[in-house]
Amino acid sequence: MPGGVTLPCSPVTGLTSAELKKLVIFLLNFCHNYDPQWREATLPARALGGGLAEKAVYENPPPMMSVNADATGPRNRRVLIVDDNRAIHDDIRKSLAAAPSSTPETEEMEALLFGDKVREAPGPPAVHFEISSAYQGEEGIEHVHRAISTGAPFALAFMDVRMPPGLDGIEALARIWQEDPALQAVICSAYSDYSWTALIARLPQVDRFLVLKKPFDSVEIRQMAYSLTEKWNAHADGSAAYASLHKSKESQRAVLRAIPDTILRLDADGACLDFKPPTGASAALAAYGAALPAEMARHFRDSVRRAIGERITQRVEFELPVGPGVCSFDAQIASLEGEEAVAVVRDITETKRASAQEALGREREAIIRAQAEALSQLSMPFIPITERVAVMPLIGDMDGRRVERIRETLVQRLADQRASAVIIDLTGVENVAAAAVVQLVRMVQAVALLGTELILTGIRGAVARRLVELGADFRGAAMRQTLQEGIDLAMRRRGA
């Protein structure tokens, strides 16, 4: 009959007639995917062990679909093929096609035929690549330009070298990188049109491309596509994290600029190392110009020394002649990293004139508490860059007492935030005391006990030699040269 077939089966043992019929229906469904005329089959009586003949009919089940979900979540897997040979496009597309996964129906049939024990362990979900084709270099450039314009850039391009009569692949890739410098590339060729010296002279960005000689193997295509698109995504994640960190720093600077008070950074002798002039209500201080910092420092030199030595915020009031009168100022002084202090100086002339002494005292106490907390945070910044990764940049000399305070603060913040990784950047650290080394080792151990990964970055050569001389043991902590590399490592290990 049209669309049907009689199966000359031998007697089947071990399966019921219902199970055998179910198996035949499954085979019909499978065959129908390749030839729609396969719609029914008749099972002879002898196949049913002498029973009545039965007919199995194609039941139009839902098609078997391959699973194309990325194992790592949504990622940029957009791939561009630029080659004048359409067969190459077909080969690459076949190499990158996701393998069909098993379905409940196929698993049930395997169990009927072979038993449960032969089932394979499920593999990882297949990676789905979004593939576009261009057949000349100019067309490839237009594809990349359009992708950038729509906010959906390609992560990888397979570039043929010879594509007559238009641009060759090397020239096209150079122009593509003007549009999209982040694009990764695989240069494909069966010839030696360019020596390595000539190639890198034309494309000096050697970290952005690989060279693949034709004929190629499907495994090479898949491995390069997965690795280079993953590299593109890791770079994008790291750039986003760095931008977030930079934005956080700019926000802190903006907060400082918005404070109307005078802010001074002082050494232990009261000498001014940095100065932010006043704005708004404190503009009276600006009349002193460049001489102001030294003049002000003389008024609270002793308080600066006490703030540094005792690590306790100090307050001092003083007066300065401004124009025809005298203005009163209130200075809040707190210790910074190393032998330095910060002073926030506020003009309180109008406040003293308008308020009673008792009300003014309460306001000062409130200001002291708020500014002490803010200054304490500034001295040991803990900057979350994601929900699971944070950065603590340190600067200045490291002594035992300071590192102990950093350790206590770090442990508390990690316990509160539940971060899975913290990066301690030592780029700004120039000297480490012996007592500080002991506290650093304890800090590494404390972070490990919390189950948090610790990454140390930016260790200078002199500091590294000092740590070796003192026998510092940082086992359990990862090391990277720069903060950016530390962020990349933390994000990569968390699949971001």
Image (cartoon, grey):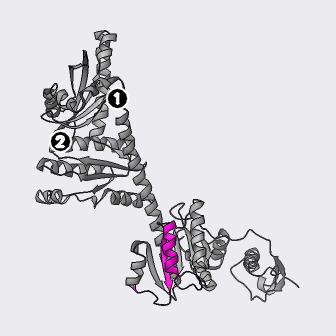
The residue pinned by badge 2 equals 338
Q: Who is closer to the viewer here, 204 or 228?
A: 204
Q: Which residue extends farthest right? A: 1
Task: Indicate which disc residue 245 carries.
Answer: none
Quadrant where the C terminus sits is: bottom left
The image shows residue 425, relative to residue 122, as above or below, that is above
Q: Which residues are magenta?
A: 166-195
Instruction: Name the quadrant containing residue 409.
Output: top left
Q: Where's residue 71, x and y in %?
A: 52, 64
Mark 2 neighbour density, 10 Å: few (under 14) some (14–19) many (20 or more): some
Q: Which kind of residue does numbered mark 2 sit on?
A: Gly
Task: Indicate which disc residue 279 carries.
Answer: 1
Q: Which kind of residue does numbered mark 1 sit on?
A: Thr
Q: Is residue 385 visible?
A: no
Instruction: Name the quadrant containing residue 485.
Output: bottom left
Q: Where's residue 218, x and y in %?
A: 53, 82
